[in-house]
Amino acid sequence: MLHGRADELALIDRLLAQTSAGRSGALVLTGPPGIGKTALLDYAAAQAGGLRVIRVAGIELEAELPFAGLHLLLRPVLDRLDALPDPQAAALRGAFGLAAAETGDRFLIGLAVLSMLAELAEEGPVLCLVDDAQWLDRSSAEALAFAARRLDHEGVLLLFGVRGVAQPMAGITVHELAALDHAAAAALLDERYPELTPPMRARMLAETEGNPLALVELPSALSAEQPTVPYDLAMLPLSARVQTAFGARAARLDETAGTLLLVAAAEPTGELSVVLDTAATFGASTADLAAAEDSGLLVRQRDQVSFRHPLARAAVLRDAPLHRRLAVHNALADTLLRTGSPEAVDRAVWHRAAASTGSDDGLADDLEAVAGRAFERADHAASSAAMERAAELSVAVSTSTRRLIAAAGAATVAGDLHRTDVLVRRAGRRAVSDTDAPRLASLRAVVEAEFGSRHTAARLLIDAADRAPAEAAAPMLVDAVRHGFLVGDADLTMRAAGLLHQRYGANLITEGLLGLARMLSGDDEFALPRLRACAEHAHAHAAELTQDERMNGAAMGLMTGFEDEARDLLETLVAEAREQSTLGTLPLRLHYLASAEYATGHTRDAIVHAEEALALAQSIGLHHQIDGPRCVLAWGAALTGDATRCRDLAEPALAAALDRRESATAALATTALAMLDLGAGRYDLVFDRLESAAREPMFVAAAFTGSVSFTPLRVEAAVRVGRTDHLAEPLDRFRRWAAASGSSCTQAVYERCLALAGPTDETEDRYNAAERLHEKGGRPFERARTALLYGEWLRRDQRKAEARTRLRIAAETFDRLGAHLWADRARAELRATGDTTGRRPTTSVLDLLTPQELQVVRLAAQGLSNRDIGGQLFLSPRTVGYHLYKAYPKLGVATRAELAALLHESR
């Protein structure tokens, strides 16, 4: 019986019932050692009923072994690998050392775990228990956390037990376990130790602080000769007291059984044959294994042994003499080397490293090789750990420093930038060679961009590029341009772009980045033709270009009004990322694609892709790629008039951007909030917001963001509130931008601004010019805004028939785009002209679907199977089936053929 855990038991029961019904879930149980996490996982396993249970426990010594935890968890079901999509199966085989590793996207392993769990659930619900998850190797923890965040309707439940909340578990529901109250603690103590005297019972209740493990273990440590708690033990922290109790129990074993216990403690995998073979070299036998089990410290399950509690393992290791621990590690290395498998050889190297007490270049070389193999398997965290230990064992300072820098690089790829920071600081305190200095500076820049200032990051990269070889300097300077642009620092961006152009000559990338820098400083006549040329070249010669070159071309197309061409490029780039399962590149591509889709009037697709970008970025921990999709979705919410959603998305993004001085994201969020108020007619709020933003130093420095992004909204708000005295400068900048951009839509918006704010005798000519330019295509939302404003002006001029023509176009376009707030405004103007026919049209049945359902039905309508759809969207086939099950009744269809016909009609 679990005393004092009624709420937790009820929670687990609900989750198990939900899983049995086909829904998935994940929960992190957290709390200090001994608080009852393992007991609750045991309860879940006992109550699982028809659920298949797979289980693993993290071990502190195992945290440096590549994918060790994941391998132990999935080892019983590896026969299912062939059922996974080929790239995922290959990634898992490489990670587990079952085949040659292919260097690839580290997130692919998480996707493979998700697919494996979904595959198991095809035969029935699955319960996955992960205890002591804080000690899983980072790569295993990341993969399991990714799967937990992506679970939906597979019938899989993941329960984690964690001390504290490990970073990879962020985003999963957490339940913190509190100490038992006095009544529950007393009931547990009385159940286990009814013979305690009242004074000892009271002392135990006070000393154990409601910790269940302490209540069970501390009384058992008392002997007839020591019936009270020693003072020095009582003064220890609670976990140390419990550990001491475990140590006392281990000390009662004879020498050979104690040695076997030490071998088991030193070998993190708990592989029984390895433990027994190694212990035999010290004279231990299976009888000693039985004695260790009888002590209650060790548990045998088939071909593995494990400790009853991590504190028991810690006690055995702590209390063993140093020479004994070193001898055991060396003996374990010998045993593992005799097995001959690559994975065992790597484990042997780690045991040799644990036994080493001084510098050893040969061992350091072996660890560097281990690091290389881990990196190839995409276990970059383990690679970093091995390289760091190699640095510690290196004789020469220069070699040690090089390895520390390599460890920092692997930690960066693993996404553990806190570790990168620690390693970079350690390396920076040493003399660094000219060869290693640029790499160290680039890693410092990564840390600085994450935790400090992008300005500083850009300066570090520019300085390092001066000393770096050509092949290393180019990406440094590209990153410096990117950092400078994001913070709106025209001088810094120009310096980096100029160096890049000077060192590598004129090409698609250097010309485009030079244009980007000149654009920030307001030199539109120079900048925009180059950006446009890069966008056009990327579109025309896409087949000849790398993915990075096409991505740059698409971004430049979005900046210069070539959204249709950008959308073509981005659709292909997204498709390639799906096909290659390169999850790390997908959120940014989806974000840009969503932006292009909003601009070209594909609103539903924009929402779908922005939602997916946001969910993926959160799933895989790409925190800096979260705010971009948030701003895109905030823009969409502004158009529909959903004020709460718009603010919930835009305000956190704006606060983070202002804190980090990132003008590009801040401008996106500010524009979304301004558009919300503009659509609702809150012109004074729009005016105040944009006037304030225009004076913000980072927007002043970034002339593009401050003048171009805000100007159309700023002009309309200023006219409405009668404050047009500050418009001359932003209008002049917008004029130059529009002329240099070559975009007819941007030029039309400029003409509309002049119609609003220019001389009244030119108003009609300006509106007519804007209409003619809009007819050339581009941005239907802006065209509808022009029609609305022109219609309003015509109505006020008592030209109602002409006004109705424009206002109907505006209302119909806004309706098609889902901009309901703006459509209602256009219909209100129509009614003012005497037209009473303008009612909001019936929404499309597709509007009844969630973004995920819309993605699924579109692919299903193309004839793709559930498995193929899941492969593209990184969902399980069962979740795909669930979405179709929910979507078909909404759409009134029953087959894929009917679905295809419906979608064809809805185009």
Image (cartoon, rainbow, N blue to C red):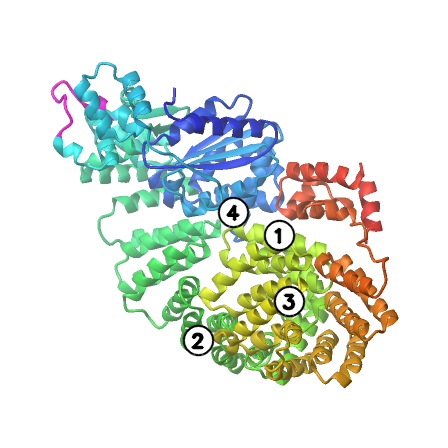
Say which residue label 4 marks.
100
The one nearer the camera, 411 or 617, is 617
Q: Nearer the viewer, mark 3 or mark 4?
A: 3
The answer to whether residue 538 is seen in the rendering is yes
Say which residue label 2 marks.
462
The percent position of residue 618, horizontal first and vertical second, equals: 53, 51
Q: Is residue 689 magenta?
A: no
The percent position of residue 614, horizontal first and vertical second, equals: 58, 53
Residue that lies at the very extreme toward the top in this rendered image: 195
Q: Is residue 375 above or below residue 523?
A: above
Residue drawn at (35%, 24%), measured in percent from left and top?
299
The quarter of the displayed image where residue 769 is located: bottom right
Alpha carbon distance from label 3 to label 1: 23 Å
Say which residue label 1 marks.
611
* On-image quarter of the N terminus: top left
The percent position of residue 147, horizontal first and vertical second, equals: 53, 42
The percent position of residue 781, horizontal first and vertical second, equals: 73, 65
Where are the magenta residues, as a range?
218-230
Say which residue label 3 marks.
550
Which sits earlier in the primary sequence, circle 4 or circle 1? 4
Q: Nearer the viewer, mark 4 or mark 2?
A: 2
